[in-house]
Image (cartoon, helix red, strand yellow):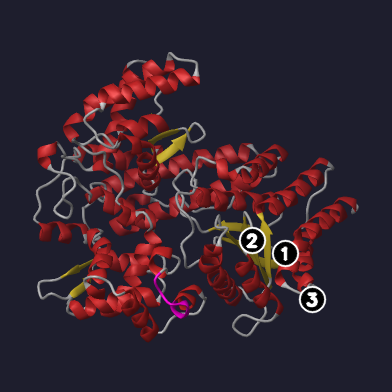
Amino acid sequence: MKKIWSISTTVRNPERIRNFLVALKPLDGEVWNHDTQRRFQILLIQHKLYGAGNKQFTNNLSREHRELLENSETLTYEQAEEILNARNYVGAGDMRGRQSFNPIKKMGLAKIDDQGRIRITSFGEYLLKEDADLGEMFFKSFLKWQLPNPLSRDFKVEDGYDIKPFIATLHLINKVNKICRKRGLTEKGLSQAEFDIFVPTLISYQNIQAQARKVLEFRTGLERLANEREKQTYTHSYVSENFEDFENMEHTKDYGDNIRRYFRMTRYFHLRGNGYYIDLEPRRSIEIQKILKTDNGSSQDFTAEAYIDYISDINLPILPWETQTELVRISNYTADDIRQYQNQLREQRIQIPDFEFKNTDRLSVEQLKAYVGELRDYRRTLQETEDHFVSQNVDKVREYIDRLRNIRQSKEKKSIELEHLATLALNAINDALAIKPNYPVGDDNQPTFTAPANKPDIECFYDAFNGVCEVTMLTNRAQWMQEGQPVMRHLRDFEDANNSKDTYCLFVAPTLHRDTVNTFWTAVKYEYEGRRQKIVPLTINELAKLLEAIIAMKDRGQRLDHRQLMNLYDSIINLTSTAPSSDVWTSQISGVVEQWSREILSAQV
């Protein structure tokens, strides 16, 4: 039986992989033996990258060891070693160290060289940079990922596997669109259901054309049906009849969701039809066509050593458009697209920032690559400017409220959706100088992942104050473990970097865990690293109530001044002077939001 493919679990959490690599860094250049394998595992435990928050790991530990893992303090190396010894693993700690090293090796981030020494590769060094572009990292990784490969036994040539999944998916969508064009049908890529069924079951580059025809056959049959139940029956029957030789078709939706999410991070796919369809990114059409012409999506023959060397080199593969001629084409195409976009925004009377377009004739290859990056950054600035303009519409604010209150029913990744909605909500407040989310985006300016762990989720700049916004969908004790210290650290780093104004932190979650609140209470009422902080914890529902007040003001022709928002923040923070405990503090916040709403509505225009 064949198996559908999916994004390996080794790459599903890039921040975790990066943290593993940070822990490995002190061992770079040392011999990879039982001692260093064990030390690596101890370092992971010390930095709470392994075991913390995992009940299966902590169940057999003493109360003292559990508390060490659960509190917010960093462990000493000796404490981490005690915990590893207490686990008494079969195969000892060195075996766990080897297992923890495997995902790093499979991604090409580190390897063991000919002398048996640990070497962080050029790919790994790139990921360790503070400004590493996760989209670029995934793009380079997916271009080289193939099935079969020497690092996995799951997919074999004799079972029919011969594919580079990322490149074959580009080919599949391109073929489907071409067939639609010939038939006079709308070119729209693949629906979510089509993607879930036909992408993970595409296991050979030789089947791309046939798979494209199957997509259209399935689509035609489905579009004849009006009843949702009939569509579900049809889909189930089609899958049963056409993919009976796959053993795990029940996982297509989960696998499809993950494939879609991570492929989108490359910026070579974009969503259309309110996210219902995934298509090739039109703003990268030159690059995509070059990929399609130079790579048919077939796998290559590698020894294990050669494959590791290949996937670990950040400079490989050599991209077919990184020539002067092609980069001039790309930069001119992108510049023309931006000029059209500028005109559209001006027609809506949206004030846009200036940009100096360059003459590309005399630019070198490296200068052209930098210029293309500048153009795309500027386009994102224009998109953020448009987002701010659109967010002033009352109907859009109502939409944000509805999406916030129903976020658990969202088909999108909930954590990404909350960061996006918080960004839109902060824009809706109206008079910020800038609202800067740190999540990565595609060329369509839609978020592809959450903000990196070393930065605030959103940075906010106003005339009278600055702020950060941190959000999470976590509600249990993991909220405190993953958000408590990082939120305060991000706020302090932002305060130090922007110290000319008061700085606040808005923290938003579905509910506020008592341990999280208690941690913030200490920072607000007493200190964090020697100084008090201004942290404002709100539930999602309280944020929605704040937006309802914004709508009421807009309906009256009023505009919220950011100083009024600062007054709300100060009122919530000042509660800590009278509230006897952290739980009383947060229980009073909803009332403060309601009182503030009444006051701003009763104020004169």
- Give the residue at mark 1: 586
- Residue 332 sits above or below residue 429 on the image: above
Magenta stretch encompasses residue 229: no
**Numbered badge on residue 332:** none
Please give the range of residues in magenta.
60-65
Residue 8: image location, x then y, percent: 29, 51
Q: Secondary structure at mark 1?
A: helix
Q: Amino acid at mark 3?
A: Ser
- Give the residue at mark 2: 512
Residue 176: image location, x then y, percent: 31, 26
Q: How many marks?
A: 3
Do labels 2 and 1 touch, CB within 8 Å? Answer: yes
Q: Give the mark nearest the N terminus, 2 or 3.
A: 2
Task: Using a 10 Å C-alpha cutoff, classify the residue at mark 3 as few (fewer than 14 neighbours), some (14 to 19) or many (20 or more).
Answer: few
Do labels 2 and 3 touch, CB within 8 Å? Answer: no
Q: Give the mark nearest the N terminus, 2 or 1.
A: 2
Please tell me which residue is depicted at 71% across the width and 78% down the height of the picture.
Answer: 525
Residue 498: image location, x then y, percent: 61, 73
Q: Give the mark nearest the N terminus, 3 or 1.
A: 3
Please tell me which residue is depicted at 28% across the width and 79% down the height of the picture.
Answer: 39
Q: Is residue 363 visible?
A: no
Please tell me which residue is depicted at 49% across the width and 49% down the height of the picture.
Answer: 447
- Residue 352 sits above or below residue 570 on the image: above
Q: Secondary structure at mark 3?
A: helix
Please tell me which residue is depicted at 36% across the width and 82% down the height of the picture.
Answer: 82
Gap between marks 3 and 1, in whole Å?
A: 13 Å
- Give the residue at mark 3: 577
Task: Using a 10 Å C-alpha cutoff, classify the residue at mark 1 as few (fewer than 14 neighbours), some (14 to 19) or many (20 or more).
Answer: many
Q: Amino acid at mark 1?
A: Thr
